[in-house]
Amino acid sequence: MRLDKFVCKSTELIKRDVIQYIHLGAVRVNHSVITNEATQVHENNTIMLNGVRLQPRAFRYILMHKAAGTICSNKDEAYPSLFNDLNVGRVSELHIAGRLDADTTGLVLITDDGRWSFNITQPAQKCEKVYRVQLARKLSADVPTTFARGILLQGEATLTLPAQVTVIHAKEVLLTITEGRFHQVKRMFAAVGNRVVSLHREQIGDVSLDVDIGQWRYLTRAEVDSFGHAFEPS
Ligand code: URA
């Protein structure tokens, strides 16, 4: 991570003041003065500000139940941001590991640990996301096989990765996918002549939604670790 970002994360200083300290030679990395704020540093480096060793703050890992009519953005736009319901500090440092559409409800994972969210969002990591889907029309019998093989979405060059359909009722299914293309679930059902009426994410990896709409909680250590390597402050 950049030196200025590390110092911001380890102190209460704002970025402008951090850069000024760095330019003044107040910051040492492994005992050498560094005056370039863009220098890449590692959490295991010894980083000191005015002779005091900085310790990175622990990363945050949050589960939230997104309400319909909120957006997965750090600021309000056409709809209010779901972060309005998240009463924690330094919200601007947080991001969502796998955004949902404004009208989609359900499980979102929120963090300030970019390496951890990579484990959730990158298709190569094969992290399963389970959606409960209400459909406008009865599911055609061939759709589970079609989705298991992969389907070409409009305007795309590659098939979707194998997806699993569990039929609940004729117009209600659970769909498990391991990627997060733009409006993926809605576009998959559109591609087989159906339409998503409502969409709710129930599960990501081993983590299931267990709080009420608009509520949130921190993930347990075991839940954090279930997605693979997470950053351990030294
Ligand atoms: N797929 C969609 O189409 N929308 C979502 O919000 C999530 C997955």
Image (spheres, rainbow, N blue to C red):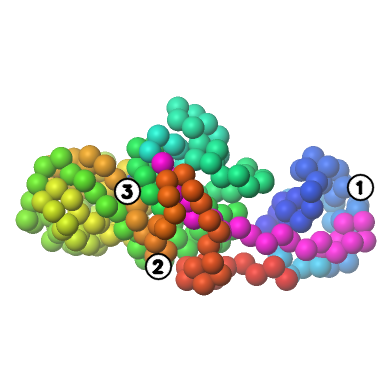
Q: Amino acid at mark 3?
A: His
Q: Label 2 vs label 3: CA separation?
A: 16 Å
Residue in the image at 69% along x and 68% along y: 233
Q: Amino acid at mark 1?
A: Leu
Q: Label 3 vs label 1: CA separation?
A: 51 Å
Residue highlighted by disc 2 = 206
User: Would you say the beta carbon of the disc 3 residue lies within 8 angstroms of ligand 1?
Assistant: no
Quarter of the figure with the C terminus = bottom right
- Judge left or right: residue 39 versus residue 149: right
Q: Earlier in the sequence, mark 2 or mark 1?
A: 1
Q: Amino acid at mark 2?
A: Asp
Numbered disc in front, either 3 or 1 = 3
| Image: magenta residue range | 47-67
171 in relation to 174, above or below:
above
Residue 174 seen in this snapshot: yes
Rendered image: mark on residue 200: 3
Residue 51 magenta-highlighted: yes
Outermost residue toward the top in this view: 78
Residue 73 seen in this snapshot: no
* Other residues around mark 3 within 10 Å, as few (<14) / some (14–19) / many (≥20): many
Say what secondary structure mark 3 lies in: strand
The foreground one among 110 and 177 is: 110
Say what secondary structure mark 1 lies in: loop
Q: Earlier in the sequence, mark 2 or mark 3?
A: 3
Quarter of the figure with the N terminus = bottom right
Numbered disc in front, either 2 or 1 = 2
